[in-house]
Image: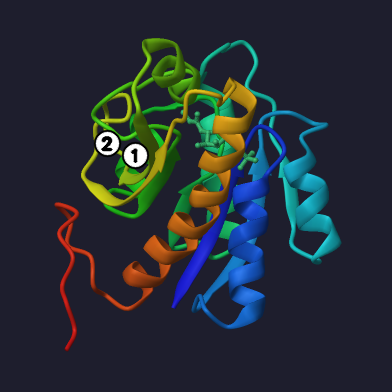
């Protein structure tokens, strides 16, 4: 059984999609806690509404990574809540060695582009500004690089001439909300290898 911690920094619509899939019975997992590096992140409110423990952790003095004391506090919280798998969902910090090693092969992320194109910050905006005609989202394992881990699931969208960044992002988010629960269910069923390959069950 996947005993999940979901990490975020913002509105948490992907977390909501995972909660909804579990409640609908299409994802066989339990969310043990939701964690955020911002006290007012709406993802924490979403967790509270579903009686899921919501944990804020202060990452000071680091601006863009989870390290040091904060990392230690997070590791303790994960142990206390009996977490065996981590889903990053809009978590805007780089995860460092302590957490990576503790959850090696058991941490995944969603990114708003078709990796390996447009990694890093604002992947959706990068793709839109580049002028690509197709883009999408990627669910991938987390490794020590930035958005470089093995790919588990991708969904495509078409960028039409009259799309704005906002209209494109709305299409992209809708696909993310399908791709993330789907990837987690494949993992729950033991159908995903460490290199991202999918085992087909006939
Ligand atoms: C999602 O679009 C996700 O792909 C992106 O942040 C958004 C979070 O939305 N993640 C990254 O850019 C990570 N590099 P949400 O808080 O509504 O789920």
Q: Is residue 25 above or below residue 36?
A: below
**Residue for badge 2:** 143
Q: Nearer the viewer, residue 50 or 175?
A: 175
Q: What residue is at 32 percent from the left and 78 percent from the top? A: 189
Disc 1 vs disc 2: Cβ atoms closer than 8 Å? yes
Q: Which mark is residue 87?
A: none
**Is 106 positioned to the left or the right of 181 in the image?**
left
- Assign the C terminus to one quadrant of the image: bottom left
The residue positioned farthest toward the bottom in the image shown: 202
Residue closer to the observer: 91 or 114:
114
The local secondary structure at tag 1 comes to helix
Mark 1–mark 2 distance (CA, rounded to whole Å): 7 Å
Residue at 52% in and 79% down: 26
Q: Is residue 5 left or right of residue 97?
A: right
Judged from the image, the secondary structure of the residue bearing numbered disc 2 is: loop
Mark 2 within 8 Å of ligand 1, using the beta carbon: no
Colouring rule applied to residues: rainbow
Residue 200 lies, in percent from the top left, at: 16, 77
**Quadrant (top left/top right/bottom left/bottom right) for the N terminus:** bottom left
Mark 1, other Cα within 10 Å: few <14 / some 14–19 / many ≥20: some
Give ligand 1's quarter of the image.
top right
Where residue 126 sits, quadrant-wise, is top left
Q: For mark 1, what is the residue?
A: 100
């Amino acid at each position: 059984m996947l005993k999940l911690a979901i990490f975020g920094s913002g509105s948490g619509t992907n977390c909501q999609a995972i909660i909804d899939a579990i409640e609908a019975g299409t994802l066989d997992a339990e969310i043990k806690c939701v964690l955020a590096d911002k006290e007012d992140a709406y993802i924490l409110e979403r967790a509270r509404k579903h009686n899921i423990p919501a944990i804020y952790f202060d990452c000071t003095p680091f601006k863009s990574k989870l390290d040091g004391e904060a990392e230690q506090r997070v590791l303790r919280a994960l142990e206390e809540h009996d977490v065996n798998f981590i889903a990053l969902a809009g978590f805007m910090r780089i995860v460092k060695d302590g957490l990576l090693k503790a959850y090696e092969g058991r941490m995944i992320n969603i990114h708003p582009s078709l990796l390996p194109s447009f990694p890093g910050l604002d992947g959706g905006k990068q793709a839109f500004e580049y002028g690509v005609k197709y883009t999408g989202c990627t669910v991938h394992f987390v490794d020590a690089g930035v958005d470089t881990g093995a790919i588990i699931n991708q969904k495509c969208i078409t960028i039409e001439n009259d799309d704005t960044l906002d209209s494109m992002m709305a299409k992209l988010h809708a696909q993310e909300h399908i791709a993330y629960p789907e990837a987690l269910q494949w993992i729950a069923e033991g159908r995903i290898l460490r290199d991202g390959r999918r085992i087909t069950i006939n």
